[in-house]
Amino acid sequence: MIEVKDVYFTYPNGVEALRGLSLMIQDGEFVAIMGQNGAGKTTLVKHFNGLLKATRGEVMVDGVSTREVSVASLARKVGFVFQNPDHQLFCETVEEEVAFALRNFGFKENAIKRRVTWALSLLGLTQYRQTSPFMLSGGERKRVALASVLAWNPKVVILDEPTIGQDYQQKEKLRQFIVQLNAQGKTVIIVTHDVEFVAECNPRVVLMAQGKTVADGVAKKILTNYDVVARASIVPPQIAQIFLGLEDLGLPTDLIDVYEARRILLNSLGVSP
Amino acid sequence: MSVFEGFRFRRVSSPIHQLDPRVKFFYVCVMFVIAVMFNKLLPLILLFFVQMPFVWMADVQREWVRSMRGALMFAFIIFLFNFVFQYFYTEYPQLPSITLIEYSLSMTLRFIVLVESFSVFFLTTSPDHLGLALEQSRVPYEFCFAFTTAVRFVPVLAEEAQTIMDAQKARGLELERGNFMKRVRNYIPILIPLIVSAIRRSLELAEAMESRAWGASEKRTNLYVLKPKRPDYALALVSVLMLILAIYAWRFLPIPSLTTFLSF
Amino acid sequence: MAVIETRGLTYTYPGTTRPSIEDVSISIETGEFVILTGPSGCGKTTLCRCFNGLIPHFYQGKLEGDLVVASLRVEEHPIYELAKHVGLVFQNPENQLFALSVEKDVAFGLENLGMPRDEIKERVDWALRMTGIEDLRERAPHELSGGQQQRVAIACVLAMQPEVMVLDEPTSFLDPLSAQKIFEVIHDLNKKLGITVVLVEHRLDLASKYANHVIVMNERKIALDGEPREVFNSERARMIGVGIPKATRLYQVLKESGVHLNRVPVTSEEASQLLREVLKRD
């Protein structure tokens, strides 16, 4: 469980990124932290594995304050997949890359071998085991970064802007993968401004603006609440926009999914689906 | 390091900031020459104070003090080094003389005077301005461009280095632990992504440069042009006068040394 | 009149055996707003690089087929000459700004061309005005947000007054609101100045409302080429896995259930309007 208690954070250059934010994430939840660029989303999640320590207030992971433990020990529980995989890749082979964290955490050699094999097969990278990560395409490198985090099986997985630069099919695959991770009991936290992606996943949404939370609830309710969406300077999903335009006809406005939209419309037209 | 803070350009509208960098550089060179001319304390102390009005006029007192503080440590090392070396070279095994102390102090003060003038120069000259000055001084454009582009990307690279460190720390890399060798090796996961990223970045920059007609014309024109104005001529004149005065003093005036002072 | 015309264009990067684009034949008319899209690796970035001559001059390699841009055959003219006619805005905002002030960056291309100072000043002022960033004139690029940086990049290219502006996924790193602003700026330039726009994008939900021509690439070849509604609604687009606007998807799923809207919508406003008509009908 991750508890954020009235956290304030100011960067060394004076920018106040978090202003009194409180949040609780239970084990096994699927949360999307959303908001405009600069709202403080990445700053917030960097507190979860101790990379940043609050200037005021406290962050507790499983009952222990992040101030009292090292980043390395928190990382064991909280895996963080950074936005740009090229900020991590440095090894000669994909195998070494995935094994890197395992070595840091003190796993034994045969355990490392097993886990590397497992992580590579999970992300469809087995054939690249001995390949240099620099030879792979952008999408493949992202998968290597993901594999290297999943290899040590953290309880919590944080993905920072996982959909940037991805095409529709890649996003679909990612979405299914994330849902699967969550189904296996992992706490999944994604930081994103991609409303359409979130609309398809329908997780819990924590909406941030200027270092504070503006809303917290089910995606369906949050992303269709225009007041809150405007305050956070994000754009609502297209389906929601379509139904906003039909508000006066008495149709429900909290729709974000295409198939649900169809169901409502067919209902309204008296057509059986 | 705080000593570097004392050299980073601070954007302020002061008369010193408006001066042509070439004139400022001339001034700095003159200060250098004068500082090297004397190895007695008195003229160096004078030189130190003579530059203060410039610091005040440029409104960069805080940063300047920081650079001075940073330089103090180096100054101490220089003093020690000079003192010990000269002592064992000339006066050992007698007790060190006042002349020796004065000499070491002078070497130290010389260093401080130089830091002082360079600090004012860099604090009041934007890298842009500097690049322009280089261009107009007939330095080939490729070098000027490399210079300004490098300066432009320094904060970007610094941020990237921080992000890379965070990313690797999040994979269990501990940079603080271990003996010296282990610590050095722990920087490989930081350096390699940084270097690879720099290479990728240069490729993208090259593409952008080409796409904006790089190399189109032999005679490249410029949006800005540095034109020396009256204050620039004034500074140049002042520098030349100081130089002449210094040469006169050096050749013809007997400068009291510390020993003379103390025997009063 | 076609401002970009290709016939059987095929390009292979040096050191590779397989071409990165194959047999590409397209025609883009002056003043069009074209969206070029397709799955990752389909060749759209490679094709963009051909339009301003980076391919073949910068990247070398083997270019076959015909490519004429603004009446110039690309193989026969150096990049700096083509740059006067085709501007290219890249994906990463940070890596296309070199100078320490916005003004200097916008002037960069014109300085390279050896233009006289007064003309450079005029054009810089004009470009800053057209992209709405006059207040950023003296700022350093590192202080700017991603969206602001991209607007500067557009101004830099605009200052050279090209007939065509090619933008390679310019909003990848931007949030949706900033992305919208960028599309509005580009649309403005297209409408007011008649600049032909070729926009490579994945975010079709935000960008498609501005386009009047859509080209979809797949596996290094042209797969679809035509009017936005037709392309987005086509079966082929679905097979390829193009992320069509949700409004169009809604149209499709309703059609499957026997509900027909009068037209294929591409934006949410259109969809609302069309749904209203159908709902009112009953």
Image: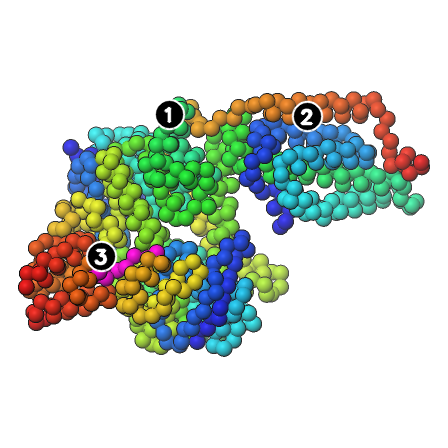
Residue A237: within the magenta? yes
Q: Is residue A128 above or below residue C36?
A: below
Kindly state the secondary structure of the residue where label 2 is placed: helix
Q: Where residue C97 appears, x then y in whole percent? A: 41, 41
Q: Is residue B153 left or right of residue C227?
A: right
The 10 Å Cα crowd at callout 1, few under 14, some 14 to 19, many 20 or more, is: few
* Residue bearing mark 2: B239
Q: Residue at x 40, y 69 (%)?
A: A157
Q: Quadrant of the N terminus of chain A?
A: bottom left
Tell me which numbered mark, 1 or 3, is placed earlier along the sequence: 1
Q: Quadrant of the C terminus of chain A?
A: bottom left
Q: Residue at x 82, y 44 (%)?
A: B83
Q: Where residue B66 appears, x then y in whole percent? A: 66, 46
The 10 Å Cα crowd at callout 3, few under 14, some 14 to 19, many 20 or more, is: many
Q: Is residue A132 above or below residue C171?
A: below
* Residue bearing mark 3: C243
Tally of numbered discs: 3
Q: Nearer the viewer, mark 2 or mark 3?
A: 2
Q: Residue at x 50, y 63 (%)?
A: A8
Hey, what amino acid is under mark 2? Ser
The span picked out in magenta is A233-244
Q: Residue at x 29, y 42 (%)?
A: C185
Mark seen at residue C119: 1
Hey, what amino acid is under mark 1? Glu
Pick the front one: A217 or A61: A217
> Do callouts 1 and 3 mark residues in contact (Cβ within 8 Å)?
no
Kindly state the secondary structure of the residue where label 1 is placed: helix
Task: Tell me how far mark 1 sits from mark 3, CA to CA.
Answer: 44 Å
Q: Is residue C31 left or right of residue B128?
A: left
Mark seen at residue B98: none
Task: Tell me how far mark 2 sits from mark 3, CA to CA.
Answer: 68 Å
Chain under label 2? B
